[in-house]
Image (cartoon, rainbow, N blue to C red):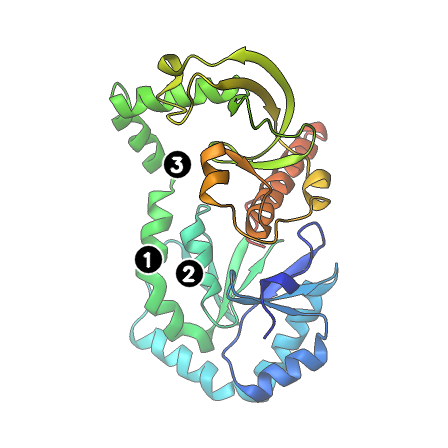
């Protein structure tokens, strides 16, 4: 299997699929999808192309007819004997339909379930009967994460934080972030107008070096490494296009780079920033067209 370096580009349409490993199934899959690449990060295959979802569904249906009649029946019987009773799970003719509030824990867990797939039109996960044992094995963690992310539960946690020092710190962090400034060493100034990784704000684009000296006593809470030799730099979030065209560093940042506070981003850092930028641009587009943004799609 190829590693993550062979994944489709983050700005290219792609869909994921996972299934139990055996050499014959993988051989049939690779014959059908020669451009598919394995992702260790997602623990799934990625298939590029705008029609990838439709082609994957067709292949999964063929595989089901080829080797899973017994497994499907076994899954049905297992569910009938020991059902999962949850408001997040429904049963259909083809298997299970799972709808939960968005949670990265839920997404990661369902990606480990063989033949589970995200239905973007229904905004739900679909799991065949044959994968019931794997689903049941992970359900406790899935349901717990879903409950934690219910709007009422999030509001309760926010209410519990009110008036606490944690809330005060969070407000101060948010206020500082809105100032879009970053202390940088005066003897190691970052280049302007290109994406750089930072130890505080992830990947940003430095727009200016103001030359104003940093007062360490005033900002120690947010930038403990800043001293009298730092000056303020202004920054903005990078666009998806800028991130796509940024060449990743060949090696991880050194301890000196991290102490300096900025470095050339790694491939993993760029991938994460591209996903964030893609979601940000989708939201902006939805606001312009007065359409609600799509649910958090896991791919």
Quadrant (top left/top right/bottom left/bottom right) for the C terminus: bottom right
Residue 168 lies left or right of residue 123; in this view the side is left
Say which quarter of the image contains residue 27.
bottom right
Residue 36 in view of the camera? yes
Q: Nearer the viewer, residue 259 or 166?
A: 259
Residue 292 in view of the camera? no
Q: Name the residue that disc number 1 marks.
A: 141
* CA separation in Å, label 3 and label 2: 21 Å
Earlier residue among tags 3 and 2 = 2
Cβ atoms at labels 1 and 2 below 8 Å apart:
yes
**In what element is the residue under mark 2?**
helix
- Which disc number belongs to residue 109? 2
Earlier residue among tags 1 and 3 = 1
Q: Which residue is drawn at 57% across and 20% down?
A: 233
Q: Residue at x 68, y 34 (%)?
A: 194
Q: How crowded is mark 2: few (under 14 residues within 10 Å), some or many (20 or more)?
A: some
Pinpoint residue 58: horizontal percent, then vertical percent.
67, 74
Q: Which residue is drawn at 34% across and 75% down?
A: 80
Quadrant (top left/top right/bottom left/bottom right) for the N terminus: bottom right
Q: Nearer the viewer, residue 61 or 93?
A: 61
* CA separation in Å, label 1 and label 3: 18 Å
Q: How many labels does the image show?
A: 3
Pinpoint residue 199: horizontal percent, then vertical percent.
47, 35
Earlier residue among tags 1 and 2 = 2
Residue 206 lies left or right of residue 171; in this view the side is right
């Amino acid at each position: 299997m190829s590693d993550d370096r062979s994944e489709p580009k983050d700005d290219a349409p792609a869909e994921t699929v996972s299934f139990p490993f055996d050499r014959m199934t993988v051989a049939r899959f690779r014959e059908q999808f020669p451009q598919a690449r394995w992702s260790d990060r997602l623990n799934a295959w990625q298939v590029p192309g705008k029609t990838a979802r439709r082609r994957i569904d067709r292949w999964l249906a063929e595989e089901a007819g080829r080797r899973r009649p017994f497994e499907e029946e076994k899954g049905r019987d297992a569910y009938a004997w020991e059902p999962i009773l949850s408001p997040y799970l429904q049963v259909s003719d083809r298997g299970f339909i799972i709808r939960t509030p968005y949670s990265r824990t839920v997404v990661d867990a369902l990606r480990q379930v063989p033949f589970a797939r995200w239905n973007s039109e229904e905004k739900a996960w679909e799991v065949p009967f044959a994968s019931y044992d794997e689903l049941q094995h992970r359900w406790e963690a899935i349901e717990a994460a879903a409950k934690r992310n219910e709007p009422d539960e999030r509001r309760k946690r926010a209410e519990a934080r009110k008036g606490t020092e944690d809330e005060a710190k969070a407000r101060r962090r948010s206020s500082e972030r809105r100032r879009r400034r970053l202390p940088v060493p005066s003897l190691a100034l970052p280049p302007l107008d290109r994406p750089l990784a930072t130890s505080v704000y992830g990947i940003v684009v430095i727009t200016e070096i103001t030359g104003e000296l940093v007062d360490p006593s005033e900002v120690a809470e947010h930038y403990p490494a800043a001293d009298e030799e730092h000056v303020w730099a202004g920054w903005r979030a990078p666009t998806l296009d800028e991130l796509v065209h940024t060449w990743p560093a060949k090696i991880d940042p050194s301890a000196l780079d991290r102490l300096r506070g900025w470095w050339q981003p790694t491939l993993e850092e760029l991938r994460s920033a591209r996903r964030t930028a893609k979601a940000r641009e989708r939201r902006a587009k939805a606001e312009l067209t007065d359409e609600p943004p799509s649910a958090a799609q896991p791919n």
